[in-house]
Image: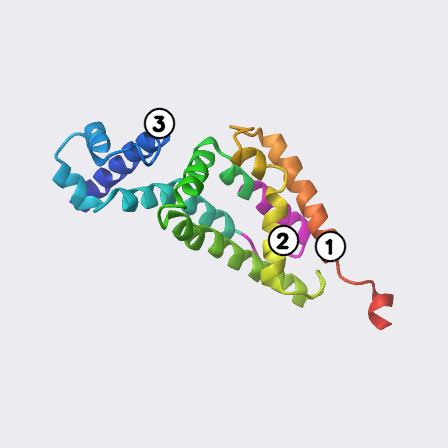
Amino acid sequence: MKSKTEAKRQEILKAAAEVFREVGYERATMSDIRARIGGSKATLYNYFPSKESLLLEVMHHARELELQAVVAALDPEAEDVRKELLRFGQAFLAVLYSPETIATRRLSIAESRHTEIGRVSFERAVLPAEKKVAEFLRAAMKRGALRTADPKIAAMHCLSLLESELLQRMLLGVIEAVKPETLTSAARRAVTAFLSGYAPAPASAARN
């Protein structure tokens, strides 16, 4: 019974994601979503009490779970900081710049003026990523692989640099999809820029 319930829940989320992408959050109705899956409106409301709660879950499944897996794989014990950040950066950008996630992020920003969707998405996706990256950078700083700084701020810098070449173009509709080689190049340049700013001081400078 539990698996059947979860299957229905996933069916609702899939249908809702399609409706939100096609007509936008404001124009979408619970009736539109119910029509995609069949059954009664009461059944739909048993799973999700409101359109906003449904959108939050759609967004969670479209992006947060994948991001959690990417950041969880970041190894604070990795000795090669550049190699680990590059591996992470490529995976991170691959999630954020898939066509599905691009649509979800645009929707989140558009609706954040009217609902709590933007804030909740930030708390569920951005903050955990910042925390995990900060833990990685703190460990690197502790062993001298990076200069000592505020790990939280350094994490913000790192994540911002990774998106620096693509974010505005994505938000303004200039790009709808990004080739893997473009993501790899963007990640490489971002990691190089980050490490140049957070490189440990030369031994001679440290003594002075």
Q: Is residue 116 one of those drawn in magenta? A: no
Q: Position of residue 47 (x, y in %)?
A: 20, 45
Whether residues under marks 3 and 2 lie with C-beta atoms below 8 angstroms apart, the answer is no
109 sits left or right of 164 in the view: left
> Which badge, 3 or 1, is on the more N-terminal residue?
3
In the rendered structure, which amino acid carries the disc numbered 1?
Answer: Gly
Q: Nearer the viewer, mark 3 or mark 2?
A: 3
Badge 3 is on which residue? 22
Which residue is labeled 1 in the image? 197
What residue sits right under mark 2 in the picture?
Answer: 157
The spot of residue 14 in percent (x, y) is: 30, 34
Q: What kind of element bears circle 1?
A: helix
Within-10-Å neighbours for mark 3: few <14, some 14–19, many 20+: few
Q: Which residue shows up at 23% across the image and 28% down it?
A: 36
Quadrant for the C terminus in the image: bottom right
The CA span between labels 3 and 1 is 43 Å
